[in-house]
Image: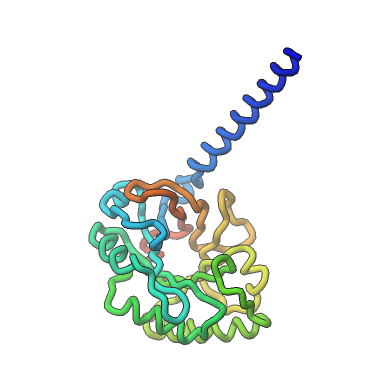
């Protein structure tokens, strides 16, 4: 019995040690900074009130801020986030969460009205994913492609810049062949994307950054900051 207890205790210790090591690996993971020196964040109201001066001191080269969702929703923190991030010198971009339940043109107008008159150094982003979306799914790629094309026409004509798609693997597998080609911001947690050409890579969904309580999405860029800012 004593041997059994000793063996059981040893097994528990091994499991706990392995779990702790995995937790540390997850929390501290980052891509090779020699290859991808630009690190950035994307934020929304989920991060609460952000201390942007502290963020600026923590190796954050750019920030994408949620502005809108669907045809009428606005993120409650976007006005403050854009103003405060810009004030401390962080290049800022804005993103819209695209819902399958509203026409693309309506969503484009919601986004454009929200960002009107604001200083945005980075290209506009269209968030295309299933998580958090409405339960409706487009009947086919042609239907979704048409709605996305309507969105792109309004936003790109008004801003004079190309939209960047934020996408997941699941979305690309389902609809990638049906949507107009645009630069890709790809979500691939803890693993470098190897099957798609990407401009931005979201590698973490719960990273730690000074000035932000709790987790935050972390990203790197395959381009220089000047190229990101100059994308049109």
Residue 227 visible to the viewer: no
| Residue at image location 32% in from the left, 70% down from the top | 120
Task: Name the residue rendered at 24%, 57% in the picture.
Answer: 88
Compared with 52, 130 (above or below) is below
Is residue 118 shown above or below 60? Answer: below
Quarter placement of the C terminus: bottom left
Residue with the most extreme front position: 1
In depth, the one of 71 and 83 nearer the eye is: 71
| Residue 120 is at least partly visible in this image | yes
Q: Quadrant of the N terminus?
A: top right
Q: Position of residue 134 (x, y in %)?
A: 57, 74
Taking the image as shown, residue 93 lies to the left or right of residue 30, namely left
Residue 77 against residue 150 in the figure, above or below: above
Residue pictured at 45% horizontal, 74% vertical: 69
Q: So how many labels did they put on this image?
A: 0
Q: Nearer the viewer, residue 193 or 202?
A: 202
Left or right placement of residue 29 versus residue 94 in this view: right
Quarter occupied by residue 198: bottom right
Residue with the most extreme left position: 87
Q: Position of residue 188 (x, y in %)?
A: 57, 56
Name the foreground residue: 226 vs 93.
93
Measured from the top left, where is residue 206 in percent x and y? Answer: 48, 50
> Above or below — where is 38 with respect to 178?
above
The residue under the point 71% across, 18% down is: 5
Residue 160 sits in quarter: bottom left
Spot occupied by residue 113 in the image (x, y as percentages of width and height)? 35, 82
């Amino acid at each position: 019995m004593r041997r059994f207890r000793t063996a059981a205790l040893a097994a528990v210790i091994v499991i706990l040690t392995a779990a702790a090591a995995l937790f540390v690996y997850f929390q501290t993971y980052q891509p090779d900074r020699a290859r991808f020196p630009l690190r950035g964040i994307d934020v929304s109201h989920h991060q609460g009130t952000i201390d942007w001066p502290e963020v600026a001191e923590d190796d954050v080269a750019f920030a994408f801020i949620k502005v809108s969702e669907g045809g009428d929703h606005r993120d409650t923190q976007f006005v403050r986030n854009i103003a405060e991030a810009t004030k401390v010198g962080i290049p800022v971009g804005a993103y819209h969460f695209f819902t399958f339940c509203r026409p693309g043109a309506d969503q484009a107008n919601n986004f454009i009205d929200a960002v009107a008159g604001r200083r945005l150094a980075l290209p506009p982003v269209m968030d295309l994913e299933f998580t958090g979306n409405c339960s409706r799914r487009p009947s086919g790629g042609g239907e979704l492609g048409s709605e996305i094309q309507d969105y792109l026409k309004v936003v790109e004509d008004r801003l004079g810049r190309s939209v960047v798609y934020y996408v997941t693997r699941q979305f690309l597998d389902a609809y990638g062949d049906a949507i107009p080609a645009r630069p890709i911001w790809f979500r691939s947690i803890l693993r470098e994307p190897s099957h798609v050409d990407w401009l931005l890579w979201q590698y973490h969904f719960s990273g730690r950054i000074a000035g932000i309580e709790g987790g935050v999405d972390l990203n790197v860029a395959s381009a220089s900051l000047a190229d990101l800012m100059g994308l049109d």
